Image: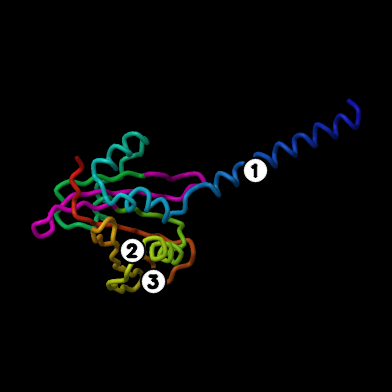
Amino acid sequence: MSKSTATLKITALVVAALAAAGSASAQEAAAPSPFADFAEKCMNEGPRYDRTAALAKESGWGTLSQDMTLGILPLDEPTAFDGWITQTGGDKPFEAIVIAKATVGEKPVESCTMAFAGVDAAQFERDLIAAKSATASGQQNGEVRVRKFFSIEREGFKEAVTLDLPTYPNGADEVVASVVAEQQIEN
């Protein structure tokens, strides 16, 4: 093999490797932010138990253990609940979704909660406020976690959003985000 042929083969391999790396970077860049994922799955159309359960089945998500599901469930005394692991392993951080139905007062409600690992908690909160015009309505402070309450309006309906965040975020945080809304009957 001549020197110029060997150089072309090496150059072709380097270009292929760079193209593959660029493709991987483009895929990572194309992946939605954790907030965008939460908005898409839980907020844009409001929490919908049946729709999310169908998406879980269609997507082949693994079942989240019942104790973990109950640990992040925002509703007391749910009448129905399910949870799934939506991604984990490899270079993808842990992500789970939990849905529930309950009655609060006389009103049937549904909730959708997502738990994330390795997330920039401060950015997640800023994205919620900017994208959904969320209004702060209170917070509960703990030693290592803070629970922040917000209200948003979607199609004339008020919805409650809760963010469970670290007290001192470091950019690679655990975030639990929930939205609770009055159940909307779909025709």
Mark 2 neighbour density, 10 Å: few (under 14) some (14–19) many (20 or more): many
Q: Position of residue 9 (x, y in %)?
A: 80, 31
Question: Which of the two discs, 3 and 1, labels the residue nearer the N terminus?
Answer: 1
Q: Is residue 167 visible?
A: yes
| Figure quadrant of the C terminus | top left
Position in image of residue 146 (x %, y %): 33, 70
Q: Which residue is mark 1?
A: 21
Q: Secondary structure at mark 1?
A: helix
Callout 3 crowding tier (Cα within 10 Å): few <14, some 14–19, many ≥20: some
Q: Which mark is residue 172?
A: none
Tell whether position 88 is magenta: yes
| Residue in the image at 33% along x and 63% along y | 163
Q: Nearer the viewer, residue 170 or 148?
A: 148
Q: Amino acid at mark 1?
A: Ala
- Residues at circles 3 and 2 in contact by the CB criterion of under 8 Å: no
Q: Looking at the rendering, which quadrant does residue 161 occupy? A: bottom left
Magenta stretch, residue numbers: 86-112
Q: Nearer the viewer, mark 3 or mark 1?
A: 1
Quarter in which the N terminus is drawn: top right
In depth, the one of 34 and 65 nearer the eye is 34
- The numbered mark at residue 167 is 3
**Gap in Å between the C-alphas at discs 1 and 2?**
35 Å
User: What residue is rendered at 25% in x and 58% in y?
Assistant: 156
Q: Nearer the viewer, mark 3 or mark 2?
A: 2
Q: Are marks 1 and 2 in contact (CB under 8 Å)?
A: no
| Alpha carbon separation for disc pair 3 and 2 | 12 Å
Q: Give the vertical position of 121 relative to 5 (above or below).
A: below
Q: Residue 181's x, y, as percent?
A: 22, 56
- Relative depth, front residue between 146 and 15: 15
Q: How many marks?
A: 3
Q: Which label was assigned to residue 163?
A: 2
Quadrant position of residue 134: bottom left
